[in-house]
Amino acid sequence: QVQPVESGGGLVQAGGSLRLSCVASGRTFSSYAMGWFRQAPGKEREFVGYIIWNGGSSYYADSVKGRFTISRDNAKNTVYLQMNSLKPEDTAVYYCAAGKGPHGSTLVDSYDYWGQGTQVTVSS
């Protein structure tokens, strides 16, 4: 069992920055990839990015590439999502999720434990 818990959401103006954190308790944190997803009202949950088990590689959706950065600290069981140059269309509930294995995926079904989400609102 893994229990991810996100924090760091809030209200920010367009062009601003936020850093989300996700602490995952339970099975060995360094054994699995971590992903970030988001869901806007009336829309399906969409992939944002992932980072592999040792932090050696990450991958991002085109919509956030160059603006968002994922990092992890395995000693603290924590993964981060640094969001810069935020846009109103980034407004959503952001979820972190624990992967089923060490390598990441863009697919929701590749993640088996999800946090409750944290709201990010970007005003224009």
Image (spheres, helix red, strand yellow):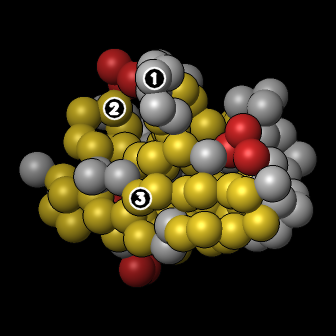
Residue drawn at x 22%, y 66% is 25
Q: Hey, what amino acid is under mark 2?
A: Tyr
Image position, residue 60 (x, y; %): 71, 36
56 lies left or right of 92? right
Q: Hey, what amino acid is under mark 3?
A: Thr
Q: Name which of mark 2 and mark 1 comes first in the sequence.
A: 1
Residue drawn at x 83%, y 40% is 65
Query: Residue 51, relative to residue 60: is it above or below?
Result: below
User: In the figure, residue 64 lies in which quadrant?
Assistant: top right
Label 1: which secondary element: loop
Q: Cα distance, mark 1 to mark 3?
A: 17 Å
Q: Name which of mark 1 and mark 3 comes first in the sequence.
A: 1
The answer to which of 47 and 72 lies nearer the viewer is 47
The residue at which mark 3 appears reads as 118
The residue at which mark 2 appears reads as 111
Residue drawn at x 36%, y 52% is 117
Query: Residue 8, relative to residue 104: is it above or below?
Result: below
Q: Can residue 16 be seen in this view?
A: yes
84 lies left or right of 106? right
Mark 3 Cα-neighbour bin, 10 Å: few <14, some 14–19, many ≥20: many
Asked if the residue under mark 3 is in contact with the one under mark 2, i.e. CB atoms within 8 Å, the reply is no
The answer to which of 93 and 74 lies nearer the viewer is 93
Label disc, if present, on residue 42 of the rendered structure: 1
Image position, residue 70 (x, y; %): 65, 56
